[in-house]
Amino acid sequence: MNDLLKERDAWSMANCSIARTLEIVGTRTALLIMREAFFGTRRFDDFAKRVGIGEPAASTRLKELTAAGLLERVPYQEPGQRTRYAYQLTEKGRDFLPVLSALRQWGDKWASGEQGPAVVVRHENCGAPVHVALRCDDGHDVPIGDSFVDAGPGLIRVGPDSP
């Protein structure tokens, strides 16, 4: 087992998945809009109100999240009104739930204040609180310190030893 972290100077972070994710959802308003989408918010005005931002900021973030494929616009029409658009999570957007859950879990422990967390997410079948855990593809829970960094197919090597 080769510890890739010992060779950090030999690889580039230009292809970093974390950096690329932050380019998509790396603003406070983008994360809060995604939170609201998971809570069932669909309409533009509701996103702006519930996130506490102005219409220009809401419009910008919703366009960015739609362009990135996390949300999609779907038409709806109330009787006697023009066609409008609601926003719903795509498969790519639904795959973002563990990220928000991990942020919530950390915030519940370290940033919730004396009163505790504002909401607790519970498993519908049994009522137990939901939490995020590191787990390998074989189903084992992986404690911090019991993993290593290995080269992925997109690793870019730099320096004198690079191919």
Image (tube, rainbow, N blue to C red):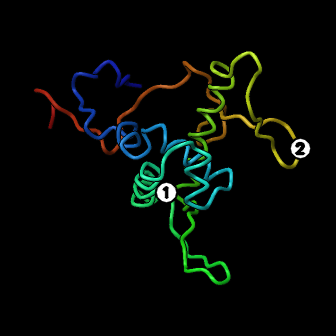
Q: Residue at x 28, y 33 (%)?
A: 13
Of 71 and 122, the residue lying toward us: 71
- Residue 97 in percent (x, y) is at 60, 46
Of marks 1 and 2, the one in the foreground: 1
Q: Are marks 1 and 2 in contact (CB under 8 Å)?
A: no
Q: Residue at x 77, y 20 (%)?
A: 115
- Residue 137 in percent (x, y) is at 59, 42
- Using residue 10 as the reference point, say whether residue 49 is left or right of it: right
Residue 138 vertical position relative to residue 93 in the rendered view, above or below: above
Is the N terminus in the top left, top right, bottom left or bottom right quadrant? top left
Dot 1 alpha-carbon crowd within 10 angstroms: few under 14, some 14 to 19, many 20 or more: many
Compute the Cα span from label 1 to label 2.
29 Å
Instruction: Locate residue 52: give its quadrant.
Output: top right
Instruction: Locate residue 40: give its quadrant.
Output: bottom right
Residue at the disc numbered 1: 70
Residue at the disc numbered 2: 126
Of 128 and 118, the residue lying toward us: 118
Of 149 and 16, the residue lying toward us: 16
Q: Tag 1: residue type?
A: Leu
Numbered mark located on residue 106 in the image: none
Residue 8 vertical position relative to residue 42 in the rendered view, above or below: above
Q: Residue at x 62, y 49 (%)?
A: 36
Q: Tag 2: residue type?
A: Cys
Dot 2 alpha-carbon crowd within 10 angstroms: few under 14, some 14 to 19, many 20 or more: few
Q: Residue at x 89, y 44 (%)?
A: 126
Query: Element under label 2?
Result: loop
Numbered-mark total: 2
